[in-house]
Image (cartoon, grey):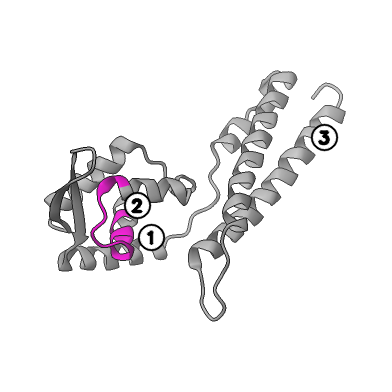
Amino acid sequence: MIPLLILGLLIQNPGAHGYELLALMEQRHYKYIVNFTKGSFYYNLQQLEERGWIEQIQQESSTSGRETRNFKITPSGRDEFEKLMVQYGTKSEYVNLQFYGALLFADEYDKDKLLELIESQIDQTISRLAHLDEYLSNTQEVPGTIDYYRRMNENSRSHHLVNLEWFERLKAEITKTPGA
């Protein structure tokens, strides 16, 4: 999915350099959509260039004297963007939290340690909600337009609220159950 994100960002920001694109991905919290690192981002950027889907448009020296590589999407890159939109836009998956896998063996695990795992899930969910709330409080949908990214984050927030309620209820039930 990283290629889709890079191509889409270059459509929105023609002439951006790699660091700008990476900063946008971090600022917009794309990590909740796909796991990426600085290394995986630059690897994908290089692959897109090697495949001819993006091209360097200029090299300029920044004020620090470092050369930046600015990119734009090519016509074949636009075609690839269209293919990736169909590929990811038609995909639907079940919620697949790794925590659910661990929970399959909850009866074989120490109750206090299980409660610590659940508390960790609660803490992570609260943190995600805080990031989403920060983003949503700093953006507004322009009347007459649809801000799909904002709507996606609103939906994600709703899912996290349901998860938080479920984790807290599970924790309470385990705490009340003798010998659980």
Magenta: main secondary structure:
helix
Mark 1 vs mark 2: which is more N-terminal? 2
The three-letter amino acid code for the residue at tag 2 is: Met
Residue 90 drawn at (x, y percent):
41, 65
Please give the name of the residue rendered at 68% of the width and 36% of the height, measured from the top-left corner: 122
The three-letter amino acid code for the residue at tag 3 is: Glu
Residue 66 drawn at (x, y percent):
19, 38
Is disc 2 surrounded by few (<14), some (14 to 19) or many (20+) residues within 10 Å?
some
- Could you tell me which secondary element the residue under label 2 belongs to? loop
Residue under label 1: 88
- Could you tell me which secondary element the residue under label 1 belongs to? helix
Is disc 3 surrounded by few (<14), some (14 to 19) or many (20+) residues within 10 Å?
few
Please give the name of the residue rendered at 62% of the width and 57% of the height, measured from the top-left corner: 137
Q: Are marks 1 and 3 in contact (CB under 8 Å)?
A: no
Near-viewer residue (155 or 59)? 59
Q: Is residue 173 left or right of residue 83?
A: right
Q: Which mark is residue 173?
A: 3
The three-letter amino acid code for the residue at tag 1 is: Tyr
* Quadrant in the picture for the C terminus: top right
Q: CA distance from mark 1 to mark 2?
A: 8 Å
- Could you tell me which secondary element the residue under label 3 belongs to? helix
Q: Magenta segment, which residues?
A: 6-19
Q: Are marks 1 and 2 in contact (CB under 8 Å)?
A: yes
Q: Are marks 3 and 2 in contact (CB under 8 Å)?
A: no
